[in-house]
């Protein structure tokens, strides 16, 4: 089915939290702006041919949080929103890069990020060839753009700040929000290695790193056409290039650590990748004899067996699919080869198999010849959940009593209790039963395990249970002292039986309960006010010390010990 671009600007109602930094996409030659409503993509402007910068494989563009276009770049220069050269935008250090090519030939680069905690400053990350003997990226830079300058047309305040000065992958540049929802993790793979450079971009304007981690499969071939994509929740990271087996990792947004590498044995070479909005399904384009688009289920540890072939293309026919990008309307758009460039869309990427509704070449083609799309991270990743640990309120009990700790459980939260003394019915549930023999403090640690146990979501709390030795009376009100005085147990110690004597109003009912030294209930009996004694057989009880309680009007009015000896 064919769709057609509408030449009209549509107001954006996609995100109430105003994270619409990817609202505008600038693609093609001449440069054409597209934006989104809740259903589709719309062409809103095309710049004059003699003003435009050319896009080869990839490009970068940036909007503010409300979705207003700020600047564009093809990696060779930075232009303002009107497609004119921004002040300072032609000073990028490109090394041995052939600037006559007309545009960046790195895939998934450059990339821009809003500076955390600042509405006017933006980071601009880009890479360059610095060694002409090896056709690989060998430096990663960043610059800073001030959008308050030049009547909001912007100014490049700083450029050519080196983050990495060694061989790195061509492209494969992406970022993920820290678990705090403010800072960013920037990740870049090293050339022909299993190392990943990671930087923490903080709200105070500081970039920490590089933090280097070796994990997964080492690349043994030139790292071209690299794809590095994070899931919208930030809990998974996919990495692949044009010639290697790709890998799926778990990602800890607190520490930036990768774990659980799952190598795709049945796929070699990646030319595009994207996650579904809910993070379950991964869509991968690979290029072998045919260009294939697959859906895979990331919830499976055996991810290869979940592979579903959605579409296959013969490169000889020229029109194929290539680079992916998850859009603000939660659809996935895929560019391809061709002139003009075809554009496909996955309409329901959260759906299994063919229900995802792949519309191949379903949109009018992009102008000119371009292979790539703007390089966006997922700006809407929310802060990780951070439940507060609650061990309950400090309390006082009589010796031998039990007490329930904590508060009701929360799904996907792991509980761990510790104490120096005192029995606990369990150490890994939300509300264990405690039987302290003396005043005891209990320590609770919780960890939110959604999605993969973020280390910075660990919270702790403490409760102290004060124990009063027997005889003990706590909180008894409106009970006649004669009632308490008339409660007696005889004989004590007991052999085969003992008798309870009591005197309560005939209109009332009491409860008598016996507990062992672990606080476990071993016998319980309701007592009526029309009687004044109760015989307790003890021959079934093992020798030892027991605690008893006499409860009236929901109050423990007497508790004491008795002994069974034979």
Image (cartoon, rainbow, N blue to C red):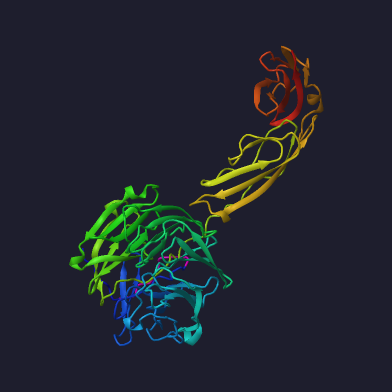
Q: Nearer the viewer, residue 57 or 469?
A: 57
Percent from the top left, x then y, of residue 260? 46, 51
Question: Height in image: 246 above or below 390?
Answer: below
Q: Point out the image quarter for the C terminus.
A: top right
Instruction: Tell how many labels.
Output: 0
Percent from the top left, x then y, of residue 525? 66, 21
Question: Height in image: 517 above or below 177?
Answer: above
Q: Nearer the viewer, residue 510 or 254?
A: 254
Can residue 331 be seen here?
A: no
Please identify the quarter of the rendering in which residue 285 is found. Answer: bottom left
Residue drawn at point x = 52 percent, y = 75 percent: 119
Residue drawn at point x = 45 percent, y = 85 percent: 91
Percent from the top left, x then y, of residue 188? 45, 66
Can residue 317 be seen here?
A: yes
Examine the structure image and report whether residue 133 is included in the region drawn in magenta. no
Magenta-colored span: 8-17
Please identify the quarter of the rendering in which residue 432 is found. Answer: top right
Residue drawn at point x = 36 percent, y = 49 percent: 303
Q: Nearer the viewer, residue 374 or 351?
A: 374
Q: Nearer the viewer, residue 418 or 166?
A: 166
Residue 361 shown left or right of residue 405 in the figure: left
Residue 529 shown left or right of residue 386 in the figure: right
Residue drawn at point x = 80 percent, y = 29 percent: 471
């Amino acid at each position: 089915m064919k769709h057609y671009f509408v030449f009209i600007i549509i107001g954006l109602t996609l995100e109430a939290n105003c994270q619409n930094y990817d609202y505008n996409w600038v693609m093609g030659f001449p440069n054409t702006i597209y934006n989104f409503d809740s259903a589709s993509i719309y062409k809103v402007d095309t710049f004059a041919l003699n003003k435009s910068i050319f896009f080869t494989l990839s490009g970068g563009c940036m909007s503010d949080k409300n979705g207003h276009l700020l600047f564009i770049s093809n990696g060779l220069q930075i232009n303002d929103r009107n497609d004119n050269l921004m002040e300072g935008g032609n000073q990028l250090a490109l090394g041995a890069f052939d600037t006559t090519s007309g545009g960046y030939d790195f895939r998934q680069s450059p990339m821009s990020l809003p500076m955390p905690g600042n509405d006017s400053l933006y980071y601009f990350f880009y890479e360059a060839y610095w060694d002409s003997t090896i056709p690989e990226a060998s430096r990663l830079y960043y610059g800073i753009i001030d959008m308050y300058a030049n009547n909001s047309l912007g100014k490049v305040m700083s450029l050519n700040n080196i983050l990495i000065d060694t061989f790195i992958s061509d492209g494969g540049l992406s970022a993920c929000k820290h678990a705090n929802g403010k800072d960013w993790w920037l990740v870049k793979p090293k050339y022909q290695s299993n190392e990943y450079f990671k930087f923490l971009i903080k709200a105070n304007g500081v970039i920490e790193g590089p933090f280097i981690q070796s994990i997964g499969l080492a690349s043994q071939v030139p790292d071209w056409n690299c794809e590095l994509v994070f899931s919208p929740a930030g809990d998974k990271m996919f990495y692949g290039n044009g010639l290697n087996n790709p890998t799926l990792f778990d990602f800890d947004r607190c520490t930036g650590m990768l774990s659980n590498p799952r190598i795709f044995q049945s796929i070699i070479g990646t030319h595009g990748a994207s996650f579904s909005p809910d993070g379950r399904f991964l869509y991968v384009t690979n290029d072998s004899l045919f260009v294939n688009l697959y859906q895979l289920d990331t919830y499976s540890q055996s991810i290869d067996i979940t592979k579903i072939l959605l579409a296959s293309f013969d490169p000889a026919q020229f029109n194929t699919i290539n680079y992916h990008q998850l859009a603000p309307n939660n659809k996935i758009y895929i560019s391809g080869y061709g002139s003009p460039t075809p554009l496909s869309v996955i309409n329901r990427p959260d759906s299994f198999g063919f229900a995802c509704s792949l519309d191949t070449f379903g949109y009018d083609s992009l102008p000119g010849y371009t292979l790539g799309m703007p390089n966006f991270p997922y700006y809407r990743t929310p802060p990780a959940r951070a439940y507060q640990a609650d061990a309950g309120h400090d309390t006082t009990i009589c010796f031998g009593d039990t007490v329930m700790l904590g508060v009701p459980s929360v799904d996907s939260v792991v509980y761990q209790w510790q104490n120096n003394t005192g029995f606990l019915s369990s150490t890994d549930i939300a509300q264990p039963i405690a039987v302290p023999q003396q005043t005891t403090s209990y320590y609770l640690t919780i960890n939110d395990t959604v999605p993969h146990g973020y280390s910075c979501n660990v919270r702790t709390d403490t409760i102290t249970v004060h124990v009063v030795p027997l005889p003990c009376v706590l909180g008894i009100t409106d009970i006649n002292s004669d009632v308490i005085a008339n409660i007696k147990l005889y004989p004590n110690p007991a052999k085969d039986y003992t008798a309870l004597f009591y005197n309560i109003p005939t209109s009332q009912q009491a409860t008598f309960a016996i507990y062992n030294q672990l606080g476990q209930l071993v016998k319980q009996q309701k007592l009526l006010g029309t009687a004044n004694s109760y015989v307790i057989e003890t021959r079934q009880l093992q020798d030892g010390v027991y605690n008893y309680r006499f409860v009236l009007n929901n109050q423990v009015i007497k508790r004491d010990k008795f002994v069974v000896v034979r």
